[in-house]
Image (cartoon, grey):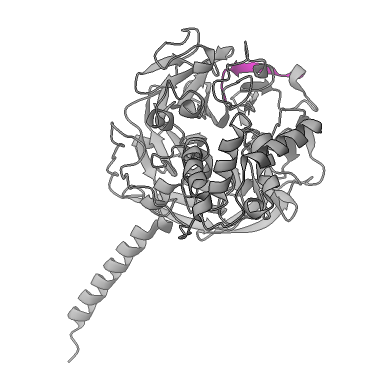
Amino acid sequence: MINKKSIRLNFLILFFCCSKLFAQDNAGLKIPDGFTANALITGLGSTRHMVITPKGKIYVRLARTVNGKGTLLLSEKDNKATVVGGFGNYGGTGIHIWKGYLYDASNSEIFRYKLNKDEEVINPDSPEKIVTGLVDKGTHETKSIMMDKDGNMYIPIGCPSNSCQINDRQPGSQGMPGCPLLETAGGVWQFKPDKLNQTYQDGIRYATGLRNVVAIDYNTQTDQIYVMQHGRDQLNNLFPALYTVKESAELPAECMYALNNGDNAGWPFIYYDQFQHKKILAPEYGGDGKKEGDSKFIDPVAAYPGHMAPNDILFYTGNMFPEHYKNGAFIAFHGSWNRAPEPQKGYFVVFQPFKDGKPYGDWEVFADGFSGSPENTASGRAEHRPCGLAQGPDGSLYVCDDLKGTIYKISYKQGAMEPVVTPAPVTDRSNTVKPAIVAKHKTAVIIPAAIRSSVLSGKAIYIKNCAVCHQADGGGVQNMNPPLIKTSYVLAPKSKSINVLLRGLSHATIDGQLFQNVMPSFSYLSDKQIADVLTYVRNSFGNRAAAVKAIDVKNAKLKLHDK
């Protein structure tokens, strides 16, 4: 005889287990209890910033065009999104909606498109050009867009430099007096939203001393623009007598600033040390890691671990999430690549509580797991990298990833218990897990005795000068620094590799993939050092190519000189 009560009980148990398993999945993300996450779509390309219209239309800006389109229009239904349109034959980052117009940015211009009553662009092939001629040197070139309540438009313009050295990224090089680059970059400019063909002369340099800002939002409580700055790099590489490798990995802080007209955040003359809680004079301008910077520079309102790359900030004004999140700031940390040999960090979305319009208490990891695993995080081999944030009309939080082009939607289950808030540990607020870096792509290579000493010497030079970008395992950094593993330019005739080290490389397309970071010249190394490090690279990471000799480097220098 069938026991109906037993069947019903087993069914309930099975339903509960399946529901729990589904809830734990959350598209691979780890989020607080009471929240759910869904991957709406993937494979869109390099999705940067996005906006959600009042009717739920999703506009996404791509860093690089896909099929000739740089901005995509998506429609969402039943936790799935589909592409229903696209326009703009340029790549970029910034996108914003204001009073019936969609504002859209390339890396040097700001456009706007009129929207119809269905919130769709009516003139996709004929945008109005609002601002033109903004600095784009291929480094820190992105342009984000934000409006205040009065409709003033704010555009952050990154400075094409690490620390405004006379010779960029060259060891010991001093800073340019006064840093003339700040005249057209390294700050936030204010423009009018409805005047066509504006240039620098039409805008106001609203705030300066900001090396590279990608994350910007308007705080309605304080009527202020808030930004997150990407801090400088390479303290140890450039000034090894003043900074250890560990200090270089951890300093300076990634800082949040609340801006007023005329503010100066101090880059490149100072940086913020989150351990000393002080503005520190930069070594390029006479600092030694201890001397304090000028008090005329504004203080950050919050500071976070170094090199985690804050790419978006969003003040939460919705009503779906619990009261704890109201008017606080979500920050998308794209993830580090330049903390080697320390573990890489970030690849998550954090929440910074606010009270009375100011950061209040410790920040919290809100959404983690984008990288795929703690090992992926530590090695910098992330599967996804959170980049853009947007708030939906129902109060959901949208997050896009610019590595695989995935858009996530995070919602709160109404009626659920208040989430248990777990701030990041005070001693290390970046990741709670610190696994050793996992070296991938290792292939056993027997080094011929004739070049063994050169390889050993080159390895030491590589670790000191090259690993910070190309990583200890030669795997590079996705979209930024090319890998050295069996790539055509590593295995090409040695003259090509020599010229790369002597001349540097910018925006290289290697084996069909674009890498955005600028590689500086290493001509300051001796002929033997260049020969040794190239011999090491050409006979490591699975490579096997002819050794480079000092005479080869000398001859290459002579040819460059003749040219």
| Magenta-highlighted residues | 202-211
Residue 166 at x, y percent in the picture: 64, 19
Residue 17 at x, y percent in the picture: 27, 67
Residue 2 found in image quarter: bottom left
Q: Is residue 246 above or below residue 446?
A: above
- Looking at the image, which residue sits at the far front? 450
Residue 129 at x, y percent in the picture: 79, 33
> Residue sitting at 35 percent across and 41 percent down?
431
Residue 94 found in image quarter: top right
Q: Is residue 11 visible?
A: yes
Q: Nearer the viewer, residue 159 or 412?
A: 159
| Residue 206 falls inside the magenta stretch | yes
Residue 425 found in image quarter: top left
Quadrant position of the C terminus in the picture: top right
Q: Is residue 398 visible?
A: no
> Residue sitting at 72 percent across and 43 percent down?
115
Q: Nearer the viewer, residue 561 or 336?
A: 561
